[in-house]
């Protein structure tokens, strides 16, 4: 169930939590501050999940393309040395 509160920027929802989670929430957040805490926790979690997924995708892509990239670097190595010889 969700209802719109007086402030149109927020919606009231009913959630259920395991007793352990609720006890932890009560320890780290005052009763009147739970909504802000849950909002920040969800945003933090989503941001870090997206970062972790991006990191995983980049790593998998680098592993999948390493031979192509190595071959390309080797192909260009000799040309670059002709144009930019070491002194």
Image (tube, rainbow, N blue to C red):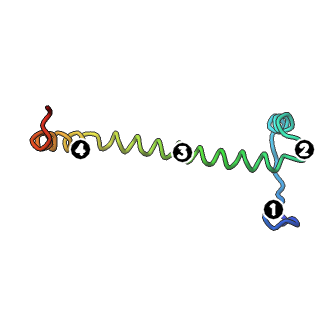
Image position of 22 (left or right of 52)? right
Percent x, y of residue 37: 78, 45
Which part of the image, by quadrant, shows the C terminus?
top left
Image position of 78 (left or right of 48)? left
Q: Which residue is mark 1?
A: 11
Question: Quick one: label 2 or label 1, which is nearer the N terminus?
Answer: 1
Q: CA distance from mark 2 to mark 3?
A: 31 Å
Q: Which residue is mark 4?
A: 68
Question: Quick one: label 3 or label 4, which is nearer the N terminus?
Answer: 3
Question: Quick one: label 2 or label 4, which is nearer the N terminus?
Answer: 2
Q: CA distance from mark 3 to mark 4?
A: 26 Å
Question: Quick one: label 1 or label 3, which is nearer the N terminus?
Answer: 1
Residue at the (14%, 33%) spot, across then down: 86
Give the farthest residue toward the top: 87
Percent x, y of residue 31: 90, 44
Instruction: Decide: few, some or many residues near mark 3? Use Cα within 10 Å; few <14, some 14-19, many ≥20.
Output: few
Residue at the (20%, 41%) spot, across then down: 73
Q: Taking 53 as reference, is 23 above or below it? A: above
Q: CA distance from mark 1 to mark 4?
A: 51 Å
Percent x, y of residue 36: 80, 49
Numbered disc 3: secondary structure? helix
**Which dot marks residue 20?**
none
Q: CA distance from mark 2 to mark 4?
A: 56 Å
Q: CA distance from mark 2 to mark 1?
A: 17 Å
Q: Which residue is mark 2?
A: 31
Percent x, y of residue 47: 60, 48
Numbered disc 1: secondary structure? strand
Q: Which residue is mark 3?
A: 51
Numbered disc 2: secondary structure? helix
Q: CA distance from mark 1 to mark 3?
A: 27 Å
Instruction: Decide: few, some or many residues near mark 1? Use Cα within 10 Å; few <14, some 14-19, many ≥20.
Output: few
């Amino acid at each position: 169930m969700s209802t719109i509160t007086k402030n149109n920027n927020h919606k009231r929802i009913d959630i259920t939590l395991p007793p352990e989670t609720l006890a932890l929430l009560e320890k780290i957040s005052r009763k009147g501050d739970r909504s802000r805490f849950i909002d920040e926790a969800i945003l933090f979690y989503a941001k870090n999940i997206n970062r972790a997924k991006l990191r995983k995708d980049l790593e998998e892509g680098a592993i999948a393309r390493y031979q192509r990239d190595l071959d390309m670097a080797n192909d260009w190595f000799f040309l670059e040395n002709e144009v930019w010889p070491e002194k």
